[in-house]
Amino acid sequence: MAEAAGNNLDLSNSLDSPDDTYDDIMHYYVYDGVRLPPFCRGKMEDIMNFTVREDDIWIVTYPKSGLWAQDLIYLLSQGGNIHEVGLDQESVEDAVPYLEYPSPGLKMLNKMKSPRLIKSHLPIRLLPIGVRQKQCKVIYVARNPKDVMCSFYDFHRMVRMVNYKGTFNQFFHRFINNKLGYGSYFDHTVDAWMHKDDPNVLFVKYEDLKKEFCVTVGKLARFMGITITAEMIDSIADYWEYEAQYNRREDRVGYWKNMFTVAMNEKFERIYPQKMKNIALQFDFGDVQ
C-alpha cells in the first residue's frame, strides 16, 4: 500500500475540498436522486418504458466493475466454443449495446433480433419496468469498491472527453460522497444485492471471475441456459489467461494497494460498513502489490 508521505497528499485539506469545476465540465444532472451523465438527460422516461423481451439477457454493472465480462457472456450466448466465436472488440460492442448511450439508441435496440444482450450502468431501480418485473434475465457484476475507485479514476484521467485533472485524493472524496456519474457505488451495489435471490437475477462478483474462473463460467452458462462441456470451459480459461486485454495490471484484484495511502484506507474502512448498510455481502480485496 502506498505511504501517505510518499504521495505528498494532505488528507486534512484536499480530501475535503471537492474539485467543483469538474461538475461544470461533465454537466451531470440528478434523476430520482441519482447523479447521471448528460447523455441520459431527457430520455429516462423512455428508458423506463423500454420494451423488455423474455429472452433478453441484461448485463448490469457500476462503472469499472468488470464489464469485460460482456465478452464472456457474449461467447456463451454464441455456444461457448472459443475456437469458433470471434471476440474482437468491434463485434462484441455491436452485439452488446448500452441501453442508455446515445449510440445505437433505444430505437435501434428495439429493432435488434432476439435473443438480445443489453448492458447498462444504471442502478436496477432505474432500469425498464419490465426488467424490474422479472421479465428477463439479469447478470449483475459487482467488484470491490477500492479497485472500482482506482479503475474509475484511471478512466477519468485517460478518456479525452472526460479529461479529469483532479488528484486521486479529490477523486476519493467524490467517490465516497456520491459525486460521480451513475451515483453512489454503494447504493448501486446494495440495490442489486437485494435482488440476488430473484429467480431472474445472477449476482456475480468480479473477484470470483478472476480467482474461480471455471466455476463462475459454469454458473453463468447454467443461468443463461447454455449447455457447455468441461473441455470448452477449460479452453475458455486458457484463452482468458493469456489474452492481454483480460490481464491488465489495473484489472487485478488488489490494484487499489498501489494507489491508496494508509490514511485513505483507514478512512475507507471506517465508513465502509455504514455505506454498505451492514448487508452480508463480502468482497475479496486482494493481495496484489
Image (spheres, grey):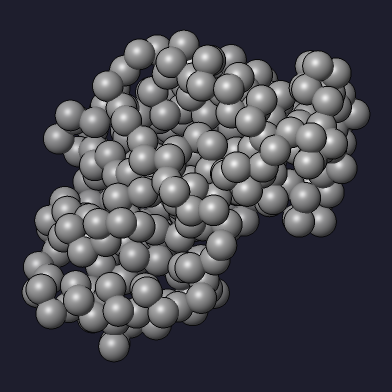
- Viewer-proximal residue among 172 and 288: 288
Q: Which residue lies furthest to the right in this view?
A: 21
Q: Position of residue 138 (x, y in %)?
A: 29, 42
Q: Which residue lies furthest to the bottom in this view?
A: 83
- Viewer-proximal residue among 37 and 112: 37
Q: In this view, does 3 lie to the left or right of 111?
A: right
Q: Where is residue 116 in the image (x, y as percent from the top left)?
A: 34, 58
- Viewer-proximal residue among 203 and 98: 203
Quadrant showing the N terminus: top right
Total tally of numbered discs in the picture? 0
Res 22 → quadrant: top right
Q: In this view, does 206 lie to the left or right of 42?
A: left
Q: Where is residue 73 in the image (x, y as percent from the top left)?
A: 32, 61
Identity of the residue drawn at 53% across and 15% down = 271
Q: Where is residue 215 in the image (x, y as percent from the top left)?
A: 17, 58
Residue 270 visible, this orientation: yes
Identity of the residue drawn at 41% across and 79% down = 242
The relative height of residue 139 versus residue 245 in the rendered view (above or below) is above
Residue 224 visible, this orientation: no
Identity of the residue drawn at 52% across and 29% down = 185
Res 197 → quadrant: top left
The relative height of residue 274 versus residue 109 in the rendered view (above or below) is above
Q: In this view, does 282 lie to the left or right of 37?
A: left
Identity of the residue drawn at 75% across and 55% down = 159
